[in-house]
Amino acid sequence: MPYVSSFRNTLARVGPGALAGLLAAFAALAAAELAAGLARPAAGPVTVVGGAVVDLAPAAVKDFAVRTFGEDDKDALRLGILFLLALSAAGLGVLSLRHLRAGAAGVLLFGAVGAAAALSRPDAAGLGDALPSLAGAAAGAATLCFLVARRAGAPPDGPAGSGRGDWNRRGFLTAAAATAGAAASAGALGRTLADRHGQDAAASRNALVLPPPASPAPALPAGAQLKVPGISPFTTPTRDFYRVDTALAVPRIDAGTWRLRIHGEGVTRPRTLTLGELLARPLVERDITLTCVSNEVGGPYTGTARWLGVPLADLLREAGVRPPSQGGRSDQLVARSADGMTLGSPVEELMDGRDAMLAVGMNGEPLPFDHGFPARMLVPGLYGYVSACKWITDMELTSFDAYDPYWVRRGWARRAPVKTQSRIDTPKPFARPAAGPVTVAGVAWAQRRGIIRVEVRIDDGPWQDADLAAPTGADTWRQWTYRWEAAPGGHTLTVRATDGTGRVQTEERTRTVPDGASGRHSVFVTVPQTTGRPARGPAGAPPRPPDNRTAVQPSLKE
Ligand SMILES: Nc1nc2c(c(=O)[nH]1)N[C@H]1C(S)=C(S)[C@@H](COP(=O)(O)O)O[C@H]1N2
Ligand SMILES: [Mo]
């Protein structure tokens, strides 16, 4: 079998090189992890390179990633980076068998790329951020030299070894195993150190006691929370609340050292606030639905929580800011976060009387780290990317002409009020509900305008009114249900909402880029044929399931 033997030969020739390359990469990552753990976890090479990739990706790519991987997009990115790194490392290892210097130089080049990415991050803390990548590269190059300088099972036709004699197979494998072990220990130590960084922040969050609101959320009227299986609960439990951000390492900020600076055009009294100063102010508590501009029609990136915070308009007024309609000099507030994100909100809307706030609490607890601890912005009626800055540290008053924030530079709209939308939560796409009465249910939202009507259409039939949950204000979504007499066959259920201005949700389909998806959500279901005869069997026994029960179509992942 000439094929097999030539494959074996090739493997015997390049295998040790590829293995040495992979081990060099492993040692590099572990050393970098250790250095990052000692210095700054957010400066780790995978985090900074991933961050740079996220930032360089155009809107369409981000949109694709969110659509394809959903909230796993960051894990997908991390895996992608590690995969490419492993591939390159194996290649460099093989190259090293003949040209060790070139291979080692390649490893150092990767380190340089990591260092450059680290220094170019908007939240870079200084030159020290280059250290993890450089330390990693040095460890990687050294590992490669150690494993390759004396080559395992050097081919008889190859040049002679370096004079110290080649590894025999056993020696090489022992050295490889020792390298792997040392790298694993270093990496684990780095992880432990990195975790310690977050512990002060976690302790400060655990110690935080939120004061009661001066203005509590209005009590939910009876009938505002429908108990239909499969419907989104009115208040989204915090653990189920969607998360959308670019942070590969979630900022863990110590509440004690956190500061918020307010400054810029037209700010006559610039100031820097501590969390204590914020919490000493009268707090408001409100139920508000937050929606992401990346939410597709029928998508999951929207949720309602009970938020506690400081009214933003008061803070701004005290700083001397006036809205443009009252002669104010700035029409855009640019919020900056600890991780270097920038979001731009219209000053007019922040001060028009809506419950725009600097939130510190979510569903009765301090904000979780994932959702912006210790403070974030929240503005009813605006998509998150133009309003909801998490881990906020800085508010600068400027103008839309003078500054384009992060997402705007990537093709998204400068101004983005939430579009009227409605969603069918149940039945799920491709469900097979039994014939007879079926409860169709979901939520509809049009923050600031409210929802006054929801209608459902079966196939091409007439629009029929759904029953609405009791109203809870214009800034929250509204649950709805519709009782459908399901007849056997395939059916398309479609929903549309009417907002408080009387405008019906448009049927015109648009993509999420640049200012949010529009169009109507519909769900296709199949109602299985029934025989029409009650199943034979003992009296009171449930009817036999229809024969085609096993032919269930796979239901799509939500
Ligand atoms: N610092 C920071 N804040 C951010 C973002 C981000 O990437 N970084 N994403 C914004 C977007 S696009 C949305 S939709 C909301 C989501 O908030 P959540 O993750 O708490 O649901 O946060 C906003 N605030
Ligand atoms: Mo978003």
Image (cartoon, rainbow, N blue to C red):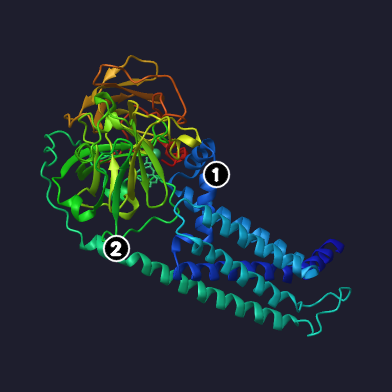
Residue 294 is situated, as x and y percent measured from the top left of the image, at 42, 36
Instruction: State how many labels appear.
Output: 2
The Cα atoms of the two marked residues, 1 and 2, are separated by 31 Å
Residue furthest to the right in view is 157
Q: State whether residue 124 appears in this view.
A: yes
The residue depicted at 18 percent of the width and 30 percent of the height is: 473
Q: Is residue 315 above or below residue 477?
A: below
Instruction: Residue at the far bottom: name it.
Output: 164
Mark 1 belongs to which amino acid?
Leu
Instruction: Give the percent coordinates (x, y) of residue 86.
Output: 63, 61
Q: State the residue position of label 2.
A: 202
Q: Is residue 15 placed above or below 354 in the rendered structure?
A: below
Amino acid carrying mark 2 in the image: Ala
Q: Nearer the viewer, residue 343 or 193?
A: 343
155 sits left or right of 121 in the view:
right
Q: Residues within 10 Å of mark 1 (few under 14, many from 20)?
A: few
Decide if residue 297 is on the left or right side of residue 127: left
Name the quadrant containing residue 481: top left
| Secondary structure beneath label 2 | helix
Residue 56: give its label.
1
State the residue at coordinates (53%, 58%): 46
Ligand 2 rendered quadrant: top left
Assign a secondary structure to mark 1: helix
Pointer 2: residues within 10 angstroms few (<14), some, or many (20+)?
some
Q: Give the x, y percent position of residue 72.
A: 46, 49
Rendered-image quadrant of the C terminus? top left
**In the foreground, 192 or 413:** 413
- In front of the other: label 1 or label 2? 1
> Up-down: is 155 above or below 455?
below
* Residue 528 visible somewhere in the drawing: no
